[in-house]
Amino acid sequence: MNEWYTLGVVGLVIVGVVFAIVRFRINPVIALAVGAAAIGLLTGLGPVDTVTTMTRGFGDVMMEAGLLIAWGVLIGAMLNEMGAITRLVDGLLRMFGKRGVPYALGLSFATYLQTIFVDVMIVIAAPLARRIAPRLGRNGTGIMGVVFAVSLETGIVLMVPGFAAVALAGLLGVPLGVMLIGGLVVVVPTVILTIMLMTIAFRLGFWNPEKDEKAIVEEPTKEDAADGSTDTAPSASSPRIDRTRTGTVRTALGGVPHGYTAVAERTEREQPLLLLFAPMLTALLLIAAQAVLTVLAIEVPAMQFIGNPVIALLFAVIATGMIGRRAVGTQRIEKSLVKGFQDGGQIFVLTGVGGSLAAVISEGDLGAILQGYFQATTFAPLLVVWVMAAVLHIAVGSVTLSAITAAGVIAPVATSLGLDPLLIALAAGAGALFCVHVTSNTFWLLQSFLGQSVRGALKTVTVGVSLASVIALAMTLVLAVFL
């Protein structure tokens, strides 16, 4: 089959998928599935083989990543229910002070807190961010906006246990421990450099509080009254969620949010913060330790079992559940698990369909065609992956979808080029961060919950995360020299 025909079919189908999602609001899962089927049929794969390949691709990816995503979702749901994130942010502020807390908070969000869904994290931590912002000076709201946007979005696609990072690892066959270490190498400098550069830009006049912030006021808390600070609040449609001195979760209006019963309030017992996070942190350490042993070619049977990501995170789920039952009661933990599965449903299907698309592409001759156009170097293909993911994200507004799609297109040629799949995953994730704008739900959440105007959100979210995208690409290219 003519190579230009094959390239044209794949290109047009991907453009068609993007157009269907953006213009006609077709669900990304359905659009990707139809696109995968179209590529198979139009490139001569045939009806039967197209369906078989799509099914196999879905199953292969879910076999690699399905349980891992499930465990991460459940851990995040339980930590959310126990109020662990709220307490963590308060603790970071006390420990690192106003100058250090943006970096401490950013690295926390981008690394070990990635089991929490972004939307949930923003809702939980935004009131605390509004308490911190005035203490950072005139540019405080802008700095906190960058911290939230950059760390949360970067962690999703580059850092295990972020669900997109896990999905990319499963799609490309990257061991989760290797993805964890590689992501850490890229994420840490990316978050630190981005926050530092954006803070400098704000201090040089890039941030204008009069135009970049919303003029909304919230009654100060008792803690704020003690230190003289004030808060900015979300709109009336976004009620503040905070904790009283007894640990009871309440809204800004004084009521108990949906899912928090009076019985649960009476039985709640506050546990040490380190204890709440201990299972997840232990699991991540076990995974990383086994990855190091694998690289060193050292076989320790016990570590091969408990350091396996599926087993390590399963133990973390069980241990977190046991701690949660003691902290907030069995009923609330069970409800949080049900809610976690509900929130994670589309992530499961999207990950699997991304695998279907990659399988259909790899089954044809696109791999051989692309191989002929790429030079035998790791840099050119990585730039192509980054650009493809960036363009998809600008059009669709989904970090996860654009990263998975870009990685799925390039994955078939990775082996033939001698390109490490880890680098493809990191380049796709970095590209998917470029230009988070008005098509993204996260953009509007950060705009409204952090007290920013649309102009302000364009600076903190769009410019800030785009800068992180470029820095992450640079870090990936540096890593490519050593792999």
Image (cartoon, rainbow, N blue to C red):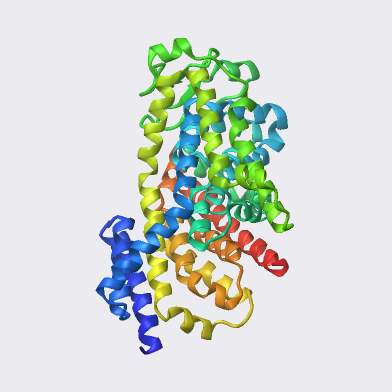
User: At which x and y percent is residue 474?
Assistant: 65, 64
Q: Is residue 257 left or right of residue 170?
A: left
Counting every numbered tag in the picture gives 0
| Residue at x 58% of width, y 60% of height | 426
| Residue at x 49% of width, y 48% of height | 163
Decide which of 25, 62 is in the foreground and name it.
62
User: At which x and y percent is residue 57?
Assistant: 39, 63
User: Is 218 rendered above or below residue 140?
Assistant: above
User: Is 137 rendered above or below residue 251?
Assistant: below
| Residue at x 69% of width, y 33% of height | 98
User: Is 120 rendered above or below residue 349?
Assistant: above
Image quadrant holding the N terminus, namely bottom left
Q: Quadrant of residue 409?
A: bottom left
Decide which of 16, 176 is in the foreground and name it.
176
Q: Is residue 171 left or right of residue 12?
A: right
**Taking the image as drawn, is residue 163 in sight?**
yes
| Residue at x 25% of width, y 60% of height | 24
Image quadrant holding the C terminus, namely bottom right
Decide which of 260, 323 is in the foreground and name it.
323
**Taking the image as drawn, is residue 132 in sight?**
no
Q: Is residue 417 left or right of residue 266?
A: right
Q: Specify the farthest residue to the bottom.
A: 2
User: Is 372 rendered above or below residue 104?
Assistant: below
Decide which of 117, 452 is in the foreground and name it.
117
User: At which x and y percent is residue 263?
Assistant: 40, 11
Q: Quadrant of residue 111?
A: top right
